[in-house]
Amino acid sequence: MKYIEEFQDPELARRLLDDIHATVTRPWALMEVCGGQTHTIIRHGIDQLLPEQVELIHGPGCPVCVTPLEVIDKALEIASRPEVIFCSFGDMLRVPGTGRDLFQVRSEGGDVRVVYSPLDALRIAQQNPAREVVFFGIGFETTAPPNAMTVHQAKKLGIPNFSLLVSHVRVPPAIEAIMTSPSCRVQAFLAAGHVCSVMGMGEYPELAARHRVPIVVTGFEPLDILEGVRRAVRQLERGEYTVDNAYARAVRPEGNPAALAMLEDVFEVTDRAWRGIGVIPASGWRLSARYRDYDAEHRFSVTDIATQEPAECRSGEVLQGLIKPHECEAFGTTCTPRNPLGATMVSSEGACAAYYLYRRLDLAPARTAPLEASPVV
Amino acid sequence: MCLAVPGRVLDIGEKDGTRMATVDFGGVVKEVCLEYLPDLRVGEYAIVHVGFALQRLDEESAKQTLELFAQLGMLQEEFGDPWERAAAEAGTGDWPFADDIAQQPHTGDAVQEAQQQ
């Protein structure tokens, strides 16, 4: 989709772009948090349709990308054991650990299975009582409640051969980490819509006020992104720093109370390492003491595995919005989707993969020619 | 995986003491847990993520999103065969994005086109 005519509602897209062009008077840097939003932006060329002064910076919101190498290595170690059936979402298969990935573990004889839902993994455990079934529990606030429910079910149904390898992460501490970084250029956030569908918006007003940064809850369709940008730019131009919901059709301010209650029961907040970024305080979840028996790290004694990421991979800087993917020397040369150095090149939501798929010839300038003040007739 | 897809509830039942539904995602039918949206009814739409209904959605928004996802091939990504995809990415299948840069479309055209309008 390369032309504005191909937007779902081109006329509305034109009006939104018109409004953004008419509102902007000086440069602003906005970060879209969600990897799905990044893909929409690059695929539809939204960054190139916006005024020159509006820069979109890609944030750390791809769960596959931010899962640390040592967690991948723990998964590979567990998945290689003969007694284990290792269940995962499909997009973890090709994420590189140290030297190999889950896809290779399977080709070497490991019993690696892809499931659509964590409940499918629990069913596999019921059907295979003589095996240990481990589910790879990664993801943000949208994925954590399904995984929490699955562990809750395992305990309720007394299924002893099921466990979870947990690496869940939370968005608000990542926003805090980005805003407190000395090299931060971000002036507004497009918050991840589906995360807010679960969590609501309660954690954001304090962040917005303290860092003087507008936070606009945004969906991931092209028109959603334009509307999110429009509202963020309006706030910036007026000197306002509040939380705004531009995705009301899917986000209620209170989130999903049943999911929040289950998270509270099954998980507890902990410090988490983010791939390429490092440890962010209070940025993740682990199983709470009541569910510790279902923690695969303890069940398989892999707690002491520690690894180092490839030095030439700059995905950490990409995830923090410090560089664009094509500014990494390895991009498109030693790092491609076929031979990825980092997860940002593997995941369908990774920023590097988005640039590789849609913008390969624009390796030098991030932006081509600027548009006139208004592209609209 | 992070993608949440709207779907329409076809019927509702119970399994292992858990409220479950069959949900239609533009032709793909999956089993979905309703524990987080217990009052969802047959015929209603919800945003579903990894087999869990997470939030209600109105019919028009849901249909628009489904249509867009289908156009973009995202339903295939969500519900297609992940092993086939991984094999293609590993170079042991048909990876659709050839390593030859010259074969790739140039998205810079989008800007030129927009300027001409």
Image: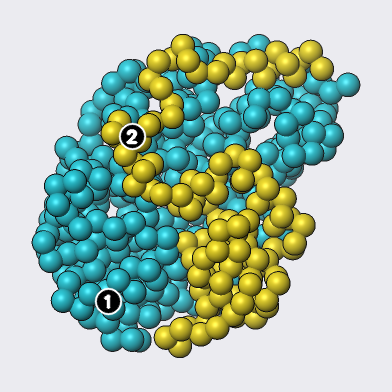
Q: Position of residue A364 (x, y in %)?
A: 48, 12
Q: Looking at the image, which residue is at 29% across and 58% down?
A: A113
Q: Please state the chain letter of the residue tagged with numbered disc 1 in the rendered image.
A: A
Q: Secondary structure at mark 1?
A: helix
Q: Looking at the image, which residue is at 75% across and 62% down?
A: B59
Dot 2 corresponds to which residue? B93
Q: Nearer the viewer, residue B45 or A237?
A: B45
The part of the image, by quadrant, that contains residue A88 is bottom left
Picture colour scheme: by chain
Q: Nearer the viewer, residue A214 or A319?
A: A319
Q: Position of residue B103 (x, y in %)?
A: 48, 15
Above or below, A188 against B26 in this view is: above
**Are the residues under badges 1 and 2 in a single subunit?**
no
Q: Please state the chain letter of the residue tagged with numbered disc 2 in the rendered image.
A: B
Q: Is residue A33 left or right of residue A6?
A: left
Type of amino acid at the residue the image marks with label 1: Gln
Q: Is residue A104 left or right of residue A368?
A: left
Few, some or many residues within 10 Å of mark 1 (<14, 14–19, 20+):
few
Q: Position of residue A283 (x, y in %)?
A: 39, 56
For the colour yellow, the matching chain is B
Q: Which mark is residue A127?
A: 1
Instruction: Please name the color used to draw chain A.
Output: cyan
Above or below, A83 against A368 in this view is: below
Q: Looking at the image, which residue is at 58% across and 31% down?
A: A43
Marks 1/2: CA distance?
31 Å
Counting every numbered tag in the picture gives 2
Quadrant position of the N terminus of chain A in the picture: top right
Q: Secondary structure at mark 2?
A: loop
